[in-house]
Image (cartoon, rainbow, N blue to C red):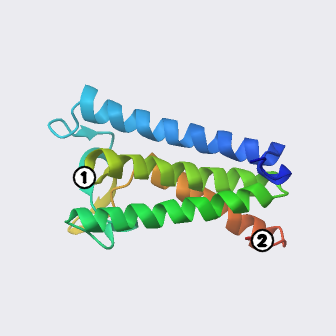
Amino acid sequence: MIMPRYFSGPLTRFGVAVAAVACLLDQVSKLYLLFVHDLAANPIRLGPFFDFVLTRNTGISYGLFQTQGVLGQWVLLGLKGLAVALLWVWLARSRDRLTALSLGLIIGGAVGNAIDRLAYGWVVDFVFFHVAAGTWRFNWYVFNLADVAIVAGVIGLLYESLVQGRAAKAP
């Protein structure tokens, strides 16, 4: 079967390349911290605001919808697969480089986290942002590079839609 021309255009290839780089960086960081550094036994203090700590996230973003069973993990994986497929169609129809970049980041991040879910049954989160002053303390959710890619992609789409005055049309 021959793919429609818009599935193989230069913006689609660019978006897929961005997705591959985002996913690769995410997976390399996780593999290093899990198996070379052994983050579970050796958390890393990066400064007064950041630490690398191992968190096993069985839910979705920000630890929502935690699942303990295999069925829940497969449901989340299926939803993620559907989302990636729909984003890929949007990417294939994109006519703007910022849209392709943003969608590539989101797809790469989603695939990176899906690989974790397949390999471990949970997503590897490790970046821990926190601020403390006296008796007050703020702890942000623990996240990973895939999450950073997803958030950056969403910001790109919002920028294009709100600041540049043109909506990034979904399929």
- Of the numbered discs 2 and 1, the one sitting upstream in the chain is 1
Residue 126 appears in the figure: no
Q: Position of residue 145 (x, y in %)?
A: 46, 46
- Which secondary structure, mark 2? loop
Q: Nearer the viewer, mark 2 or mark 1?
A: 2
Q: Position of residue 55 (x, y in %)?
A: 25, 52
At a point 55% along the width and 48% down the height, the residue shown is 108
Image quarter of residue 37? top left
Question: Is 6 above or below relative to 162?
Answer: above
Please indicate whether residue 52 sits to the left or right of residue 89 in the image.
left
Residue nearest the viewer, comparing 45 with 59: 59
Q: Quickly name the residue at label 2.
A: 169
Residue nearest the viewer, comparing 64 with 91: 91
Callout 1 amino acid: Thr
Question: Is 33 above or below relative to 143?
Answer: above
Q: Quadrant of the C terminus?
A: bottom right
Q: Quickly name the residue at label 1.
A: 55
Callout 2 amino acid: Lys
Q: Position of residue 23 (x, y in %)?
A: 51, 42
Residue 57 appears in the figure: yes
Residue positioned most to the left? 41
